[in-house]
Structures are given as C-alpha cells and as structure tokens.
C-alpha cells in the first residue's frame, strides 16, 4: 500500500525524535540576521538565537518558506509516495500556505503520478504539531489521502493552544504591539496569557497575571476548564524554560489522563517575535 507522505513547516514545534519516528518532512522557516539567512532549527539552535537578542540593535527578520522550498520537499517525498498531505501554519501568521499551494500545483505538473493536498491548519506551534502528528499516525495505517486529511481536519477543529509570554518587549520591538504597551509591561511586569482557539488562526489575550507561578497555575486551570475530565493529547512548549516545562508536564500527567504528552522547544523563528521565557500547552481531547 502506498502510504501518504506528511509535509509540514518548522512552526509545528515537533520534537526531532517524533519527526524521525513518523517520517515527517519538515520545511524550515527562515530568518535573516546580519545579512545571513538561517534555516529554522537547522543552522542555529533556540539557545543561540536568544543569545543574539541582547546585542542586536534590530531583531532578525523572519521569512516563510518559498514555493521552491516546498517543491524541494515534495520532490523528495515523491521518490517513495504518490500522495502527499501538506499541513501549514495559519495563513494569518505566514505566507506558508500560499507557497505550499503554488508548489503543489508545480509538483502535480512536473512530477509523475503525484497528488498533493494542502491544508491551512488554522493554528500554529504545538497545536499545529498535534495536527501533523495525528495525520502522520493515520498515514501509517491508511492509504487514502482523503481519509488522512479528514483525520487532520478533525483534530484541527478541536486543538487548543494556551501559553504565556515573559514580556511584551520583543513583540513591541518587532512592531507587533505598540511600544507604549511594552514600556508599561516593563514597569508592571505583566505576563499575558493568550490562546489560539481551534481554527481561529490567530492569538487572543485571555488573562493577564503578574508572576510566572500564577501564569502556570492559570494554564492548568484553563486546561481543566476545556477538557472536562476527558483524556488529552498534549505538547508542552517552552523557550529557555526547560525545567519549568518538565515540571508542567509532570503536573499535567498527575492532574489529567494523558494519552500522549511531549516537551518541545518553541521554534527559533517564532521565538524571535516572543522572546525567551515562553511556556505553553497545546492539547486536544478525544471525540
């Protein structure tokens, strides 16, 4: 049986061992710093990108994968597969979906006997990763591109992401929020908790707290409100906060029924906009 190949972008924040285990093809996002182009998660590690921040006058700029980048990935998986599902992060965050659609059209014209489905997952980061992982699991046992796509869309309709930022400074420096907001944040040290609801495609502020312990407590409370006693699939995401991420994972396992749970670095390209200290949970419940 010709299984379905799964392609995604590095915004999915999947652990490397999971990517290898399920044979997921990851197209790296790019960022530019000091005239050099870096591939997300390949040319530089998350820790190194955060070391750049204190000495940078301007933050690195980020770039979506090009149609050519996606075409290279499709050409690679086409060596073993005739059916491909490409899952991109929300089109409200990036041009990745548009690039993947262009690449899919070119691939179907140039490559022999290949069919490509491109899906905007309506979310990002670990939530995107859970959609990708569900599709990759389905592709192991299912040869139908339609059915694997249905699995991905089913998880898309249920996956939540909640996280908090340690500071608004980097969002402001990158022009994502007004600088006056970042200035106020530097005075009162707020920790904004945000969510990306299923299929919303964008982040919204849920709560604002003052300390990291309170923010972590609120994350757990928000998960509890949404899961209502059901078992969960989850990814704990962090940037330079591994110890807290491990502790949060332990608390999730002790408080909830976890069918699967992973810890993952917040990908460097996304970290450019959020800064270090991000901690969050992506999760969904079974039907």
Image: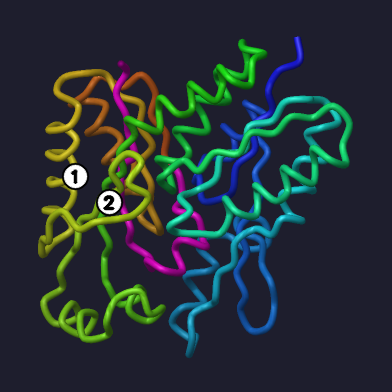
Q: Which mark is residue 163?
A: 2
Q: Which residue is mark 1?
A: 219
* Image quadrant in which you'd find residue 105: top right
Residue bounds of the magenta highlight: 264-287
**On screen, 236 above or below 164?**
above
Q: Pointers 2 and 1 in contact (CB under 8 A)?
A: yes
Q: Residue at x 49, y 22 (%)?
A: 150
Residue 112: x and y, percent? 89, 31
Residue 183: x and y, percent? 21, 85
Q: Residue at x 71, y 55 (%)?
A: 67
Foreground: 123 or 17?
Answer: 123
Is-magenta flag for residue 283?
yes
Q: Which mark is residue 184?
A: none
Q: Is residue 272 left or right of residue 227?
A: right
Residue 286: x and y, percent? 32, 18
Is-magenta flag for residue 286?
yes
Q: Is residue 174 left or right of residue 41?
A: left
Q: Earlier in the sequence, mark 2 or mark 1?
A: 2
Q: Residue at x 52, y 33 (%)?
A: 132
Classify 10 Å Cα crowding around label 1: few (below 14), some (14-19), many (20 and above).
many
Residue 90: x and y, percent? 45, 50
């Amino acid at each position: 049986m010709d299984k379905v190949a799964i392609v995604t972008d590095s915004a999915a924040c999947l652990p490397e061992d999971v990517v290898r285990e399920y044979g997921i093809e990851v197209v790296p996002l790019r960022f530019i710093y000091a005239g050099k182009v870096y591939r997300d998660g390949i040319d530089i590690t998350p820790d190194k990108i955060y070391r750049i921040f204190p000495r940078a006058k301007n933050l690195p700029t980020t770039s979506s994968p090009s149609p050519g980048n996606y075409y290279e990935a499709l050409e690679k998986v086409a060596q073993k597969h005739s059916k491909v599902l490409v899952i991109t992060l929300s089109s409200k965050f990036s041009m990745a979906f548009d690039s993947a659609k262009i690449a899919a059209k070119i691939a179907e014209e140039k490559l022999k006997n290949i069919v490509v489905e491109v899906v905007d997952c309506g979310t990002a980061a670990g939530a995107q990763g859970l959609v990708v992982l569900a599709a990759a699991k389905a592709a192991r046992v299912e040869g139908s591109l339609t059915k694997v796509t249905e699995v991905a869309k089913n998880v898309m309709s249920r996956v939540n992401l909640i996280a908090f930022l340690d500071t608004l400074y980097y969002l402001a420096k990158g022009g994502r929020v007004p600088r006056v907001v970042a200035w106020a944040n530097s005075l009162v040290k707020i920790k904004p908790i945000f969510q990306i609801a299923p299929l919303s495609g964008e982040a919204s502020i849920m709560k604002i707290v003052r300390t990291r312990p309170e923010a972590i407590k609120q994350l757990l409370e928000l998960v509890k409100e949404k899961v209502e006693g059901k078992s969960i699939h989850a990814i704990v995401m962090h940037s330079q906060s591994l110890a807290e991420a491990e502790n949060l994972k332990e608390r999730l396992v002790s408080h909830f029924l976890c069918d699967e749970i992973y810890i993952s670095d917040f990908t460097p390209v996304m970290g450019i906009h959020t800064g270090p200290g991000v901690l969050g949970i992506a999760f969904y419940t079974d039907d």
